Image (cartoon, grey):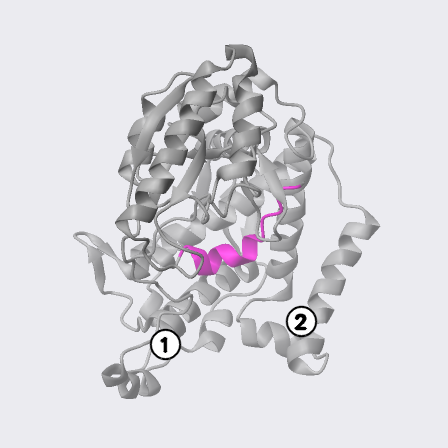
Amino acid sequence: MKKTVTLLLMLCLLCALLAGCGGEGATQTEAPVEETPVEETPAETPVPEEELDALETASFDYDNAYAAYSPETVVLNIGETPVNWTKYEGALSQLVYELNAYYGISDLSEELEEGLSVADWALSWTENYLSQLTLLHQKASEQGLTLTEEDQSEIDADIQEQADAYFDGDVDALFAEMHVPEELYRYQAEAALYYDKLFVQAFGEAGELLSEEDAVAYVADQGYLNAKHILWLFTDDEGAELSDEEKDARRAEAAQVLETLREAQEEQREELFDSLMAQYSQDPGKESYPDGYYFQSGDMVQPFEDAAASLAAGELSELVESDYGVHLLYRPAMRAEHIFDYDSAGQPYTLRYLAADGLFANMMDDWMAELEVRYAEGFEQLDLMELFAYSA
């Protein structure tokens, strides 16, 4: 399983900072999580109706920005790699477009926090984003990694597919609507493929080059707890709350199962627990997470978390009650091949992959910290309102 990063989407995702969105993390939605109401933030934050009229009369002139310098003018050097105006203006223009179109930001001089304007943030973000793209190209070259004809065909097919879907096959119209030049788009797409190749070279397709010891140590260092559990729900199949008598019957059954497990030989306990979990547990996630749940503080209801934290590997909990029902926990030893979660396509990934992914991100951070960025004269601090000929 490759860690494919669609770097183009980072332009959208990083705008979440301005919308107050949280970062994306692994979720196990079928676990007994705390049922706290959360306000969902849409992918494209709607502009309040009272601001729509102002936005309709406010505009940025992207053509003015594009024509401000010749396409091959060097704006900055990232390490030994020059970045031209086409790439720089393309990344900056798409960001400004998204800030305006999706978040209603028209005054780039507006302060995000004391001493930091939207323009300052946008310039810093553009530098950082282009540095990541360039770094991936550089590291791939240093390590002798190249793109194949199949890789390039994949990029071509992706571009044509989008053009066919939205612009009757007109590629030029596609890039005009995206506010990104084709040169930058391809640079981004190539960087995403290099990310995959660098990851696979370092850790393997699914992290298989990472040792058991290192994978488990990484997960533990990130503060993850783990536990299997047998759950007796306090609701029926339709979700209606059980009567007190029905709840007591489930408590009694749970107590009997606990006694059975306590009487088992320690070396047979996990196998017996799995068998009883399959027989009795009413947790809808038991089949998706046969290795138990891996979670950090705050992910689970408090009684579940507290019980798991109190257990050493191989230990059983007492019966624990939450708003969901009665839980009986068993904490297995962490193993690199345990299922941690599932990707967006529904494919499982393991602790080993989670660790490899995190360690590779750390490598990227270290590489980024070593990069030297030097601006060409006159590009140290662009006036974005002037560059985009903003008219209110």
Q: Quadrant of residue 195?
A: top right
Q: Name the spot of residue 48 as percent of width and height, x first.
A: 27, 79
Discs 2, 1 touching: Cβ within 8 Å: no
Q: Quadrant of residue 106?
A: bottom left
Q: What kind of residue is marked 1? A: Ala
Q: Secondary structure at mark 2?
A: helix
Quarter placement of the N terminus: top right
Q: Residue furthest left?
A: 114
Q: Residue at x 44, y 33 (%)?
A: 229
Q: Name the spot of residue 334 as percent of width and height, x first.
A: 51, 22
Range shown magenta: 2-14
Q: Nearer the viewer, residue 167 or 316?
A: 316
Task: Check the image and report above or below for 327 versus 50.
Answer: above
- Find residue 162 and name its label: 2
Q: Residue at x 61, y 27 (%)?
A: 337
Q: Secondary structure at mark 1?
A: loop
Quarter placement of the C terminus: bottom left
Q: Nearer the viewer, residue 140 or 150?
A: 150
Residue 357 seen in the current view: no
Residue position marked by numbered label 1 in the rendering: 389
Q: What kind of residue is marked 2? A: Gln
Q: Name the spot of residue 141 as percent of width and height, x first.
A: 69, 36
Query: In the displayed structure, does residue 173 sit left or right of residue 376?
Result: right
Task: Check the image and report above or below for 226 versus 269.
Answer: below
